[in-house]
Amino acid sequence: MAAKAAVPLYLPLSSIGGLGITEENSQPADPIPVKIPSRNFKKASRASGKAYFTVAGKFIGEKTFVFHKCTCEHKECKVLTEIERKEIHQKFWATSNWQVQSTLICQTIKISEPKRSSVRQSRVNHSRNYFLGNKHVCKLVYMKTLGISSGRINYCLNVKTHEGFCSPDKRGRRKAPNKTPECKLEEVKTFLDSLPKFQSHYSQSDRKYLHPDLTTTKLYKLYSEKVSSGMPLHIKKFLQEFKQYNVPIYLPKADTCQTCDTLNLKIKAAENQNHWFLLEGQRTAHHVRAEEARSALTLATNYSKTREDVLVFTFDLQKTQPLPHLTTSVAFYKRQLWLYNLGINTRHDNKGHMCTWLESEGKRGANEICLCMLEFLKTQNLLAIEHVKTFNDCCGGQNRNSTMISFMMWACRNFDLKSWEHRFMEPGHSYLPNDSDFGKIEKRKKKYGPIDCKDTYTTLIKESQPKAQFNVLDMSGKFKNVHNLVEQRKFTKKNAKGEPFNFLKLNWYKVFQNNSVHFRQTDGNGSIQYIEFPSLIETFDTDLHSSVQSVKISQEKYQDLMTLLQFVPEVHHKFYMDLEY
């Protein structure tokens, strides 16, 4: 028996033109690698008349229409025009179904008794009449028009049923003798169902995981010991079923919660049962608060999609971006200018808004965060908005302070908002939609070259999400002094009941137009408390006039930037040289 020809891994461009590969920007003599397609791809290509390679590596070209000029005298071949024949050819292969095409062949060929017969015994016991568009044509025109061979015609007519249809192909219908029995697969599923599972506290989804101490090898060993028949599946088949089960083994995260890690260590080293119950209660309460915050964000997101008068958004600072961003290793040992980016994500449309500014234009404290939110609010339809709900992490210097509450009070009165509700995510579990937005920016940044100026960063941010581009708000020259709003109010350290009040222990608060604040603290019993911050002046300032002066960088950083100018285009040198230090 002759050996089967191997499929060529490299083919010259000239031999695969039918596959849609052109020679543009390529050398014709150079071979290119061709990926071997699957059997289903070959089958689909064959049924639709496209080019493909056989299993033996033979190249079959695309089915093209060929107009055959017939010289028949007694047929209607000449009645069919070239346009009609081409249309019949295209419709035939447009079905892309081998069974439909075979049935069409059976129905357009009529078998009849021979009109003439000889005295001698003849092999011809019937005659075939070919029809295209209800026109009686010869066999050659029939084959050329459809682009089929005489062998396919013979096959279709041999398997033709009495109803005039082509009998379905029987190949591949037989049950595979080596197929894994269903009872074996059910044993694997039963075993995997019996394993304990848990939900990660570092995930926003409800996906379940297996214990991180397990491995695929340990899993297979446990499965083999538990099989009642004593004949477990092969490990390869077992791993295929485990993958389809879609409950992976948990991989410990690198950036884990500090509170969880501390409590886990203390629980393992608990001195007695009472101490263990105390620590376990603290960990459970911590997880409950994290789940409550996530549920509140989900509920607010769904609520904002049905109410036009409610604006819900999350905000968070991205990690600082160096400027210039260089690929040379010298930059790793030099101080660079930082670019800050506050990401805001509106939950009703999941759209990202990025407020960017340089280290020399402002800091990254509560004052800058408030002004970024103000610039964002100006882009919204404030006439229709009555309530605002926001979510972010627990950074005290940026969010948990009197400056933030003063700004929210000012915004409620200035924009005629009835309330502004803010929720802090649990520390270590603050997974916000902004993290996904920042991830897209970082992914795009890896494919970028050197970044020399702020405008290039702006372009990078917009290109990070092409379909729904991020809205970039440049904060240059827009920073003002928000701290004067704090000076107009009297911030007490006790609530309405005379109990101590601490900004750093807030996990939720709601600001109203009348200067009152409802809040809840992390160390409390979960009840909502009340406090009022009255104004020290009768007329509350409704505008922010005083601008913030530019921030000077250190002299050491300025000198490092000057040494990096050799890697920066000269057109940007003046920007770095004019920085104040």
Image (spheres, rainbow, N blue to C red):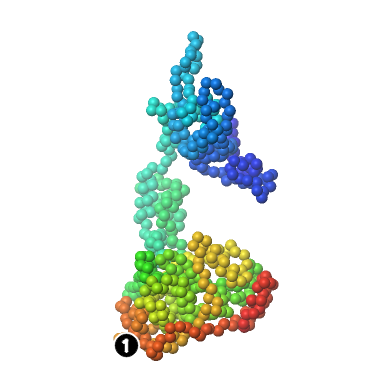
Residue positioned 37% across, 57% down in the render? 195
The answer to whether residue 469 of the structure is visible from this angle is yes
Quadrant of the rendering where the C terminus is positioned: bottom right
Residue placed most toward the observer, 241 or 523: 523
* Image quadrant assignment for residue 492: bottom left
Q: Which residue is mark 1?
A: 498
Residue positioned 58% across, 23% down in the render? 71
Q: Is residue 305 above or below residue 152?
A: below
Residue 308 location, x and y as percent?
A: 37, 68
Residue 526 location, x and y as percent?
A: 32, 76
Q: Is residue 9 above or below residue 529?
A: above
Residue 325 location, x and y as percent?
A: 61, 70
The answer to whether residue 432 of the structure is visible from this angle is no
Q: Is residue 456 above or below residue 2?
A: below
Q: Tag 1's secondary structure?
A: loop
Residue placed most toward the observer, 561 or 206: 561
Residue placed most toward the observer, 2 or 541: 541
In the figure, is residue 573 to the left or right of 173?
A: right
Residue 528 location, x and y as percent?
A: 31, 78
Quadrant of the rendering where the N terminus is positioned: top right
Residue positioned 62% across, 82% down in the render? 580
- What's under tag 1, amino acid-wise? Gly
Q: Is residue 514 above or below residue 301?
A: below
In the displayed orientation, state which residue is furthest to the top. Answer: 119
Label 1, residues with CA under 10 Å away: few <14, some 14-19, many ≥20: few
